[in-house]
Image (cartoon, rainbow, N blue to C red):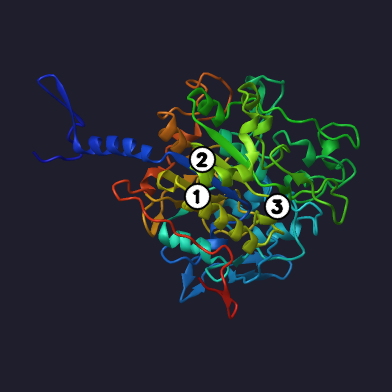
Amino acid sequence: MTWTKSTVTLLSVAGVLFLAPSARARQAALQDIHKIKHVVVIMQENRSFDSYFGTYPGANGIPMRNGEPAVCVPDPRTNQCVKPYHDPHDLNRGGPHGQVNAANDIAGGKMDGFIAEVRRGPQRCADPNDPSCGSAQVDVMGYHDDREIPNYWAYARNFVLQDNIFEPNASWSLPEHLFLISEWSARCMRQGDPMSCINALQNPGNPPDFGRGRANGRGRANGRGRGTGRGRANRMNLPANQPPAAPDYAWTDLTYLLHKQHVSWAYYVLKGTEPDCEDDTEATCVQRRQNARTPGIWNPLPYFDTVKEDGELNNVQSLDNFFSAAKSGKLPSVAWICPSGDVSEHPPGLVSAGQAYVTTLINAIMKGPDWESTAIFLTWDDWGGFYDHVVPPHVDENGYGLRVPGIVISPYAKQGYIDHQILSHDAYAKFIEDDFLGGQRLDPKTDGRADPRPDVRENAAQLGDLRSDFDFSQPPRKPLMLNPHPAKKNGAAVR
């Protein structure tokens, strides 16, 4: 018998159901995903796809003509149109990257607002994580390649590079990290009431450390890159010099479903510094310390009601525990890893420091007994103001945001594969749900905990499927151990 697209998937012969080949393949794929026993999401900071992989062979990178960039972005100060260029510097500055900045960078699909947004932003902001901050240095058109990031390019060559993965929200780091663990960014109007939460793309409830000392400062510049003079506290109708209270994230997050199904999870935090200052009126500051017991913009789970009610605050742990778990073969089923400021690649963090830190994390997994059953999803939280040429697809009022790099590393990952599917970080939640939760979604109609989120992001029609990045029929591949500090020769890094 010849099977065609019109052939019915289910056939009934003598009352017995048979699966057509296409259905059998899908069913096999559903089962094969369970070869992955551990998902580790490594989230770095503030890089666009074009800024790291814009010249990667075969990828949807910077448009070229005769070996030269065929696109440019106007600089309103010089009246010149600036093309993307190779930037060998280890320290980058980037540009404003809040909600309004995203819209202005995209510029109605022209993708030419990046330099203008830097020019509009407050210069030399004391708080490098303020998404309204510009920089005296305009480097948003610069890109790196394997001379500066040889390990990232090696992972791409040996595993899977995703060249159409977008930040799920068109905004900055805190909303992105909320989407990463809950598929939504909201502000809740009544303590402990999920139904009181309202959509908040730019200003969800911010951790107190992010507002302390801001009453007399420039504030967050209302998302437009220009200071209001009133500071964050007054815009939140708080008395001068009074920091905002700790936020209450009452809507449902992914750990709620994991806990219900007895799926282990951990959120690992590297002890060090946050990238934000307590007082943005200061020209310099001593950055706040962070650890697993300091909730913040990169560590929001302790503010979720579900985490507290389920008694799982201790699942937010020191990164030391990650290394111990990787070595002993006791990685949780689901893990997220949060950097400290100096290794985050968030300006002014050095690119080389971030690459070394990420390589150390991946090496730890590869050396451990859990490697043969692990999928590592390496990505960056938002574009950080850096140039990208691809217009983001529209999914709802929250996004998608701009394109970011994404790499899948696993013994079952296809080798040297470039995934051109439309993806966002929502696909990580979808993969976790398919692997460990039987396909249950963060859906208020079915997850047992209602909230008014605008949609179920994992079910978006255009969202691709990360299972396409794996070949579960292949024997588990050997680890690729890399030197965290690649040697350099004549200014070019070599392995």
Residue at image point 48% right, 36% down: 333
Q: Quadrant of residue 359?
A: bottom right
| Picture layout, residue 37 above or below residue 305 | below
Q: Secondary structure at mark 3?
A: helix
Q: Earlier in the sequence, mark 2 or mark 1?
A: 2
Q: Position of residue 14 (x, y in %)?
A: 9, 20
**What amino acid is labelled 3 in the image?**
Gly
Q: Comparing marks 3 and 1, which lies closer to the viewer?
A: 1
Where residue 430 is drawn, which disc sits there?
A: none
Tag 2: residue type?
Answer: Leu
Q: How many marks?
A: 3
Label 1 near label 2: C-beta < 8 Å?
yes
Residue that numbered label 2 is attached to:
331
Which residue in the structure is indicated by mark 3? 341
Q: Quadrant of the N terminus?
A: top left
Q: Residues within 10 Å of mark 2 (few under 14, many from 20)?
A: many
Seen in the picture, residue 276 relative to 26 is either above or below; the reply is below
Question: How far across and down, in percent of the image, does residue 229 sit?
Answer: 87, 46
Q: Give the Cα separation between the discs numbered 3 and 1.
A: 22 Å
Q: Is residue 10 visible?
A: yes
- Earlier-in-chain disc, 2 versus 3: 2
Compared with 256, 408 (above or below) is: below
Circle 1 sits in a helix, a strand or a loop, which is it? helix
- Of labels 3 and 1, earlier in sequence is 3
Look at mark 1 in the image and give the residue it sits on: 365
Q: Out of 256 and 488, give the one closest to the viewer.
A: 488
Q: Residue furthest front?
A: 328
Frontmost residue, 200 versus 106 = 200
